[in-house]
Image (spheres, rainbow, N blue to C red):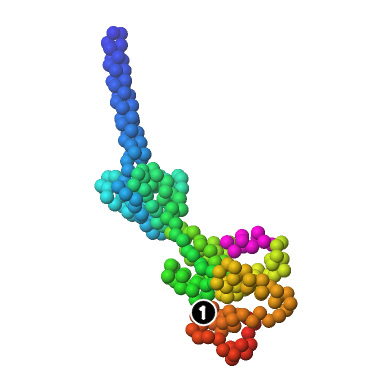
Amino acid sequence: MVLEEQILHYYLNHIKKFFILFIIIIIIFFSFLSFYLFLNKKYEKNYVVNISKGESLEEISNIILFNSNIIEKKFFYYLLRFQNTFFNKIHYGEFEFKSNTSIISIIDIISNPSNVLYELTVVDGWQKYQLDKLFIDLFEKNNDIDYEDILADTYIYQSNNTLDDILNLMKKNKNDYFKNFDSKYPHNEYSINEIMIIASLVEKEGIDYIDKKKISSVIFNRLQKKMKLQIDASTIFAITRGNYKLSRPLNFDDLKIKDKY
């Protein structure tokens, strides 16, 4: 009986020691994990990485932790797999990480749409060829949108946005803008397309705000009286359709052109 108690006591002591060791290992592991995730800063200065569509998680790990060892990259890869499987998917595009960004913040950043923003500005009075050049310069692709669907404005977009995303943003911007004026003059007397045409004429003819205000009054007065507008910009557009800049002055023969504009 005494021997059995000694054996039981012996095993209990070993189980207790094993349990204490296990607890210590767990504490060390989670301490390391907490340090790695929350306190370990990966960049000495602000840094931008580009994650291309279709890149594997392992490739993403190598891109983000370009200056880390293989073990750390592998550990980060498994964190990305865990995030991608159970939480938000990893996004693609450009991402900026600040100098004090932790690992957990990096994972959160790339699990959301790109945080690198760009500006695209459409200038008042631009013609179609100028819009085409802007889209080709930025996206290496011509625009597939009607000229009258775009308002002059500055548009903010993310690095992973496509040209189609930008065009949809422009259409929404125009629709939202005109919703605010449905019952006000001149929106209650003219169609949106007519107002866009009038606005284009004003932009091409006017020099500053005061000048444009006077020209718009003249245009609306002539329209009310069903007079000819007699504006150079309408004749120029009838010739060029906005596809190029007319490099010569208008002449009397131009005024004989039969055109709806």
Is 111 placed above or below 239 here?
above
Q: Quadrant of the C terminus?
A: bottom right
Q: Is residue 11 visible?
A: no
Q: Nearer the viewer, residue 72 or 175?
A: 175
Measuring from the top left, give residue 117's x and y in whole percent: 44, 57
User: From the viewer's perspective, is 199 left or right of 89?
Assistant: right
Is 181 placed above or below 249 here?
above
Q: Quadrant of residue 256?
A: bottom right
Q: Which residues are magenta?
A: 173-182
User: From the viewer's perspective, is 218 left or right of 102?
Assistant: right
Q: Which residue is mark 1?
A: 243
- 22 is within the stretch colored magenta: no
Measuring from the top left, give residue 74's x and y in whole percent: 31, 47
Q: Nearer the viewer, residue 79 or 144?
A: 144
Is 243 placed above or below 89 here?
below
In the image, farthest residue toward the top: 2
| Residue ID at (36%, 45%) | 101
| Residue ID at (42%, 55%) | 116
Measuring from the top left, give residue 27's x and y in whole percent: 33, 30
Give the class, few, some or many, for how many residues have Cα within 10 Å of label 1's Cα (few <14, many ≥20).
Answer: some
Q: Quadrant of residue 196?
A: bottom right
| Residue ID at (42%, 70%) | 137
In the image, farthest residue toward the right: 225
In the image, farthest residue toward the left: 69
Question: Regarding mark 1 in the picture, which secondary structure is present there?
Answer: loop
